[in-house]
Every structure is written in structure tokens, then in C-alpha cells.
Image: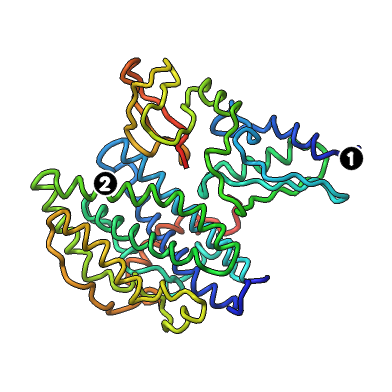
């Protein structure tokens, strides 16, 4: 049975970021285009950070998710990935997972654990390339934010 | 391949290889700080920064492969020192943390100017990558600019170490600005802003302002290099670095990692 682009997109919503299992690559904004022709499914993905070690895993998971359809997965740089491409559902998933969603400014970032805006950025870097480190003055917990880029 | 202009593939190789090798070598030396940085936050920050740089290098090596170079892994693991085009200062063993901060601040300012110049290149795949890379690099420059200021005003000890680090580096920065090619080559590609005198003058202006703001005396113009890493003239330090870097890979050349 031939797969459609719509069906392929639906299947890709099950491909989760290996570092943030609550977030799909669709909600992350990585899927640039899906084209179907007689040779199979062509998926163009926008890499998040250049040095992201998860890219190979993501490529494999996309191929697995598309079941029997022969898939060609490419990473393209024709437009830069930015954190504005994370969907509203993706932002909610991040918060629920314990990571504050990206914002335009590091001021007033809400703690994903207690919701307080009384937080401070302790470092523009974190445990992964896409994270910044924060501290919540109200619940006295460190947390991470998906770093704005 | 359509490079969009009359420039030859070999011109693009000569342009991209020094950038790729700088990023790779600076990241390798940076990775040697892992577990040793002054605090946990810095350990995370510096390892993220160096991982970014390796990602950038990989992007450039992949472009070089499109232009006919070997695959990135072979380019990184399979070259003798004389085929590397990185600046010599980047292959030198790490000094103390203050010297590392000075080096990385100097390098990030240079890289910022170089990326600005490269963003005007007429090869679309390069332009596309540079756009993403610059978004990441802005964090690096900001990070080391902040560290530089902190050490300059921190304590007499931190300031003394920073000034000593600058002194140790200054005489050996010269080939950073070289392309190992005559400047006419860049002009022909429409990239005059990357030529040695132009980028060096821009770098000296920015670093000069920084030193002045910190009240650190200007050491004078960066002297011309005695040897040029951009022409494959390297110190013994690069061979030592490559020995360490390829040690695991050389234990089994046929292994798939």
C-alpha cells in the first residue's frame, strides 16, 4: 500500500527526541518537508544544533517509523532551526517533562516544577547543547530551559 | 555542483579547510579541560561549546567531501600534520584557565569576523550553514567575553594570570589571520573582507577596545608569523595532539564506530 505524505507526517508524530522523550520531532519543528514519489518517502529534516549527537538516532527512528515505505532522510540547512519553531503542544510537553520552554529573554522564565517566575539563569549552557541552566528561588530547585536560539 | 560563481572547487576547499581545521583543533584542546574546568557550570558550558565546534567542523568537512575531499572521518583521522591548515596557536597545549579564556576570547572574536565575511560567500550551501553556525557562535563569544571581564576585574591573582596568558599568546597569533594564499585569491572570490590585513585590523580594533576597557596595556600589533599553519607548517604539538586523538581509532582501523 502506498503511503501518503499526510500519513507519513502522522507517523512522524510518534518519533520522539531521544533526549526529551516527551517531545516529537514534529512538535520540535524539525520536519521541513515530506514528499512521496514512486521511489519512496523523502523526508527533509532541519537539524537543531549542528553538533547534536542525536541526529543519527533521529534519522534511524524516522526510517523505522515509516514502516515498510522506503525512506530517504536528509538533514537540510536551507533554513536555520530556531526555538520559535517549537509548537504550542511542544512547549506544553517540555514543561510537563520538567524543562522550561524557550523564551525571547532569560528574565521571567517560569519554573517548570512550581510555576514561579522568580527564577535566575545560572548559565547559558546546560547538560545538552540545547539547554540553559536556571535556578528557582521559590522552590529552591535547579532546572533547565530549552535554550533560545 | 553549481557554486554560483566562477570560483573553482579548489578555491572553496582552500577557503573552507582552514575554518574546519581551526574548529576541530580548538575543540579538541577544549575537550582536554573536561572535568578540570573551574566549576561544574563551566564544565557543562565548555564541553557544550566544544561539542558545538566539533559539529561545525563536521559540517565544513561534509562540504569538503562534496568538493572531492575524503569523507569527514578520514579527513580527521587520516591526515599527517603537514596536511592540516589550522592556526598554530590552536594546537599548543593548554595553559592555565586564564590563558585558555584569553585564547578562546581572541579566537571567538576572530571567528565572529571570519563568519561575517564568509556569510557573503556566493556558494549557497556554505551560506546556509554559516547562518545556523552564527546563531550558536554568538553564545560562545558572549561566554568568553564575560569570562575575560570577570578575570580582568576579579582579584589581583586572576588579573595577573589573565595578563600573563595574553603575553604568552600574543607573539604567536600571527597565522590566525593568514589564509596561506595570496590576497588576490580572496579578492577574486569577492571576499576582500577576509583578507589578512583587513580581518587583522578589524580584530585588533575589537580586542584593543576590550583591553582598553579592562585597563590592560595594548601589547602592540600582532607580529607577522614566523611560520604558517595555513601552509601546513606546524609545531611538534600538533603531532602529539594527533597521536592522542587517533589513539583509539588506530587500535582497529577496520572497526565501525
Q: Residues within 10 Å of mark 2 (few under 14, many from 20)?
A: some
Q: Residue at x 27, y 62 (%)?
A: B206
Task: State the separation of the CA atoms marked 2 and 1.
Answer: 56 Å
Q: Position of residue B215 (x, y in %)?
A: 12, 56
Label 2 and label 1 in one chain: no
Q: Residue at x 42, y 15 (%)?
A: A114
Left or right of A95, for residue B8: right
| Residue in front for this viewpoint, A140 or B73 | A140
What residue did someone put label 2 on?
A: B146
What residue did someone put label 1 on?
A: A2
What secondary structure is marked by label 1? loop
| Residue in front for this viewpoint, B229 or B197 | B197
Vertical placement of residue B189 versus B130, above or below: below
Q: Residue at x 31, y 56 (%)?
A: B104
Vertical placement of residue B26 versus A80, above or below: below
Q: Residue lying furthest left in this view? A: B156
Q: Chain of mark 2?
A: B
Q: Position of residue B28 (x, y in %)?
A: 39, 55
| Residue in front for this viewpoint, B208 or B97 | B208
Q: Position of residue A72 (x, y in %)?
A: 75, 49
Residue A113 sits in quarter: top left
Q: Residue lying furthest right in this view? A: A1
Q: Residue at x 78, y 37 (%)?
A: A8
Vertical placement of residue A77 versus B12, above or below: above
Amino acid at each position: 500500500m502506498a503511503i501518503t505524505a499526510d500519513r507519513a507526517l502522522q507517523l512522524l508524530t510518534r518519533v520522539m527526541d531521544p533526549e526529551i522523550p516527551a517531545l516529537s520531532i514534529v512538535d520540535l519543528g524539525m520536519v521541513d518537508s515530506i514528499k512521496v514519489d514512486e521511489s519512496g518517502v523523502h523526508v527533509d529534516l532541519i537539524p537543531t544544533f549542528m553538533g547534536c549527537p542525536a541526529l543519527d538516532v533521529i534519522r534511524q527512528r524516522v526510517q523505522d517509523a515509516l514502516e515498510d515505505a522506503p525512506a530517504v532522510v536528509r538533514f537540510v540547512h536551507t533554513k536555520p532551526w530556531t526555538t520559535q519553531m517549537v509548537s504550542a503542544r511542544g512547549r506544553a510537553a517540555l514543561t510537563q517533562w520538567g524543562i522550561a520552554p524557550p523564551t525571547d529573554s532569560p528574565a521571567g522564565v517560569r519554573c517548570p516544577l512550581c510555576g514561579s517566575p522568580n527564577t535566575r539563569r545560572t548559565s547559558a549552557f546546560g547538560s545538552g547543547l540545547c539547554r540553559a541552566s536556571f535556578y528557582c528561588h521559590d522552590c529552591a530547585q535547579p532546572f533547565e530551559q530549552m535554550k533560545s536560539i | 555542483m553549481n557554486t554560483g560563481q566562477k570560483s573553482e572547487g579548489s578555491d572553496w576547499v582552500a577557503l573552507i579547510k582552514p575554518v574546519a581545521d581551526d574548529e576541530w583543533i580548538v575543540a579538541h584542546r577544549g575537550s582536554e579541560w573536561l572535568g578540570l574546568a573551574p566549576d561544574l557550570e563551566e564544565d557543562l558550558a565548555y564541553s557544550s561549546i566544544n561539542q558545538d565546534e566539533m559539529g561545525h567542523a563536521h559540517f565544513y568537512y561534509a562540504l569538503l567531501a562534496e568538493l572531492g575531499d575524503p569523507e569527514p572521518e578520514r579527513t580527521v583521522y587520516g591526515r599527517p600534520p603537514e596536511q592540516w591548515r589550522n592556526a598554530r596557536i590552536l594546537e599548543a597545549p593548554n595553559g592555565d584557565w586564564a590563558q585558555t579564556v584569553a585564547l578562546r576570547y581572541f579566537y571567538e572574536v576572530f571567528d565572529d569576523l571570519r563568519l561575517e565575511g564568509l556569510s557573503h560567500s556566493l556558494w549557497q550551501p556554505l551560506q546556509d550553514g554559516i547562518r545556523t553556525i552564527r546563531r550558536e557562535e554568538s553564545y560562545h563569544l558572549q561566554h568568553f567575553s564575560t569570562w575575560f571581564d570577570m578575570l580582568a576585574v576579579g582579584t589581583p591573582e586572576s588579573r595577573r594570570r589573565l595578563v600573563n596568558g595574553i603575553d604568552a599568546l600574543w607573539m604567536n597569533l600571527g597565522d590566525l589571520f593568514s589564509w596561506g594564499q595570496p590576497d588576490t585569491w580572496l579578492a577574486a572570490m569577492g571576499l576582500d573582507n577576509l583578507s589578512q590585513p583587513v580581518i587583522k585590523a578589524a580584530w585588533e580594533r575589537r580586542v584593543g577596545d576590550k583591553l582598553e576597557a579592562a585597563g590592560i596595556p595594548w601589547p602592540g600589533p600582532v607580529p607577522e608569523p614566523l611560520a604558517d599553519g595555513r601552509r601546513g607548517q606546524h609545531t611538534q604539538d600538533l603531532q602529539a595532539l594527533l597521536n592522542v586523538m587517533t589513539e583509539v581509532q588506530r587500535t582497529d582501523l577496520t572497526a565501525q564506530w
